[in-house]
Image: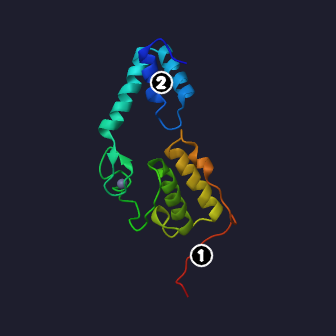
Amino acid sequence: MLYPSEAVEKAISQLSQLPGIGRKSAQRIVFYLLKVPAEEVRLLAESLLRIKERVTRCSICCSITEQDPCAICTDPKRDQKVICVVEEANDVLAAQFAQEFYDRFFGTGAFAGRPQPLGQAFHEARMAIRAADPANPTWLAYVLYGDPYGQVVLGDGS
Ligand SMILES: [Zn+2]
């Protein structure tokens, strides 16, 4: 259905170019935006422009960032020997989960010398990710297969 407004058609056309947004979703978004105050639409438009002006890729890890190198790469507490490869920038939480989990399970980083049982390490890593980005439900996606009481035992290797 074509609308008698060139501006509405243009907005629907532009939004429907976005991944996961078909024409019907684009129509819903445009009609929603027609109902809200102009200030709200202006703030949305400015935030979209701002990401193009300010956000770049970290020269070390290629994650999205507003400072190069990013906060993760410049974190002095980060174990420089661990490299986590993620497919998309929004997978950074998965990399953080892995770091949180392995530090607890193997007793490294902030948990040096104090390895936790598998289940406890897993649970605490999930809670750390949840606290890092409360609006992101990614923390629910991690599943543990294994004995929750399994634990790394530190020794001299003999
Ligand atoms: Zn980085």
Which residue is situated farthest in the top direction here?
4
Viewport quadrant of the N terminus: top right
Q: Which residue is mark 2?
A: 12
Instruction: Look at the numbered disc 1 and give the secondary structure of its residue.
Output: loop
Question: Does label 1 point to a residue whose CB lies under 8 Å from ligand 1?
Answer: no
Q: Is residue 157 above or below residue 122?
A: below
Q: What residue sits 33% from the left and 58% below the top?
A: 60
Q: Nearer the viewer, residue 40 or 10?
A: 10
Residues at badges 2 and 1 in contact (C-beta under 8 Å)?
Answer: no
Which x, y percent locates residue 53?
Answer: 30, 36
Amino acid on which the number 2 mark rests in the picture: Ile
Which x, y percent locates residue 32?
Answer: 52, 19
Q: Which residue is mark 1?
A: 153
Q: Nearer the viewer, residue 81 or 113?
A: 81
Q: How is the image coloured?
A: rainbow
Which residue is situated farthest in the bottom direction here?
158
Q: Nearer the viewer, residue 154 or 91?
A: 91
Which x, y percent locates residue 34?
Answer: 48, 15
Disc 2 to disc 1, C-alpha distance: 59 Å
Viewport quadrant of the C terminus: bottom right
Q: Nearer the viewer, residue 84 or 152?
A: 84
Crowding near the residue tagged with mark 1, few <14, some 14–19, many ≥20 C-alpha atoms within 10 Å: few
Q: What residue sits 59% from the left and 60% below the top?
A: 121
Sequence order check: which comes first, mark 2 or mark 1? 2
